[in-house]
Image (spheres, helix red, strand yellow):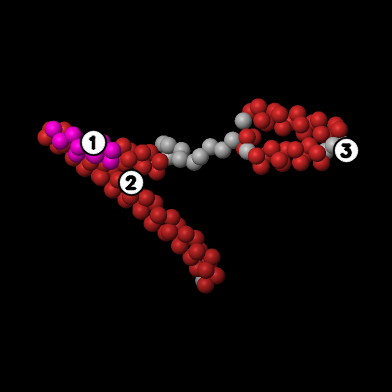
Amino acid sequence: MRRHGASHLPESLATAQEERERIRASNLLNELHDLHDRVLGILETAEELGDLRAATGAIREARSLIELLAKLTGQIDHQPEVNIVLSPQWLTIRVAILDALEPFPEARVAVGDRLLTVAGAA
């Protein structure tokens, strides 16, 4: 019974931890949605009162919240795109590979052709 409990307890703890994280993420999204609704209410009031400064601030906040929500829900990819083909490090590595293959002309040509193909696809 102890072995059975020992093997299933970590699994249960992991599942419980995942559930807590899911609930926290859901709560965070709900709070952001609520905050966004409040900002839109402030924007509407500011517009009704003709308070352009407050309206502009509310628009800025609404935009910021929309962007944050889109990032958190995966609608915006916030990871930078890196083109390795243009990086100085890659150019150095490419030269080193081709230099190392100099004694093997067929392999050098094959690798060179393949590198050109990969660079063209990037």
Instruction: First in sequence, mark 3 or 1: give its number.
Output: 1
Within 10 Å of disc 3 (Cα), the crowding (few <14, some 14-19, many 20+) is few
Residue 40 visible in the shown view: no
Residue 104 lies left or right of residue 85; in this view the side is right
Instruction: First in sequence, mark 2 or 3: give its number.
Output: 2
Within 10 Å of disc 2 (Cα), the crowding (few <14, some 14-19, many 20+) is some
Q: Could you tell me what secondary structure mostly forms the magenta stretch?
A: helix
Which residue is tagged 2? Answer: 29
Amino acid at pointer 3: Pro
Amino acid at pointer 2: Leu
Decide which of 4, 54 is in the foreground and name it.
54
Instruction: Estimate the x, y position of residue 54 in percent, counting from the top left.
Output: 19, 39
Which residue is tagged 3? Answer: 103
Q: Which residues are magenta?
A: 50-61
- How far apart, in angstroms, are the residues tagged by discs 2 and 3? 60 Å
Numbered mark located on residue 56 in the image: 1
Per the image, label 3 sits on a secondary structure element best described as: loop
Quadrant where the image shows the C terminus: top right
In the rendered image, the vertical position of residue 5 relative to residue 46, given as above or below: below
Residue 75 visible in the shown view: yes
Query: Viewer-nearest of labels 1 and 2?
Result: 1
Numbered mark located on residue 84 in the image: none
Per the image, label 2 sits on a secondary structure element best described as: helix
